[in-house]
Amino acid sequence: MKLDDFLCFTVYSTNHAFNRIYKPLLETLDLTYPQYLAMVALWQKDDQTVGSLGEKLFLESSTLTPLLKRLEATGHLKRVRDARDERQVRIQLTESGRALEEKAQAIPNCILEATGLTEETLQALKHALSKVRTAMLR
């Protein structure tokens, strides 16, 4: 067996490389990478339940809740009980959270540039990895 033959190691080590690129970009927004992903999902669709946000991010509620509490403490979102179903907690962006989206606009292009890949190649790679993830989650 050789380490370089493992797809999982390639994905794992690539994730570390991505984190090194994201870290200084996200520091300017005072966000961690998981917080950034939560914000991106909320910029895409505001006023989600914790459960629906967790599904999108592939995170359990026990992992997501502390992350959301930290974002709430920074003033980027608020957590409110659903008026129709008090068991549900809804996540809503604040003005500060919506304003942060503008500051984050350049990040995807920075990442694309750092990969050295074309947009088309990156989309094909993302599609292939999504298929792998879907197959493994069955």
Image: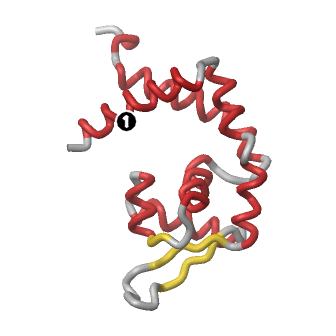
Q: Residue at x 49, y 67 (%)?
A: 65
Residue ranking furthest to the front = 120
Q: Secondary structure at mark 1?
A: helix
Q: Which residue is mark 1?
A: 130
Eyeballing the image, is 138 above or below 123?
below
Give percent across and percent down for residue 85: 37, 87
Q: Nearer the viewer, residue 123 or 134?
A: 123
Q: Tag 1: Cα neighbours inside 10 Å, few (<14), some, or many (≥20)?
A: few
Q: Quadrant of residue 113?
A: top right
Residue at image point 59% right, 54% down = 40
| Residue sitting farthest toward the left | 138
x and y percent of residue 86 in the render?
Answer: 40, 88
* Up-down relation of residue 62 to residue 33 (above or below): below
Colour approach in the figure: secondary structure
Residue drawn where x is 79% and y is 47% of the image? 28
Q: Quadrant of residue 9?
A: top left
Q: Is residue 133 above or below residue 52?
A: above
Q: Which of the image's four quarters has the N terminus?
A: top left
Type of amino acid under label 1: Ser
Position of residue 1 in the picture relative to residue 115 (left or right):
left
Residue shown at 40% from the left, 31% from the top? 127
Q: Position of residue 32 (x, y in %)?
A: 64, 50
Q: Which residue is at the front of the view, 79 or 113? A: 113
Residue 100 found in image quarter: bottom right
Could you say where residue 3 lies in the image, as x and y percent from the top left? 37, 13
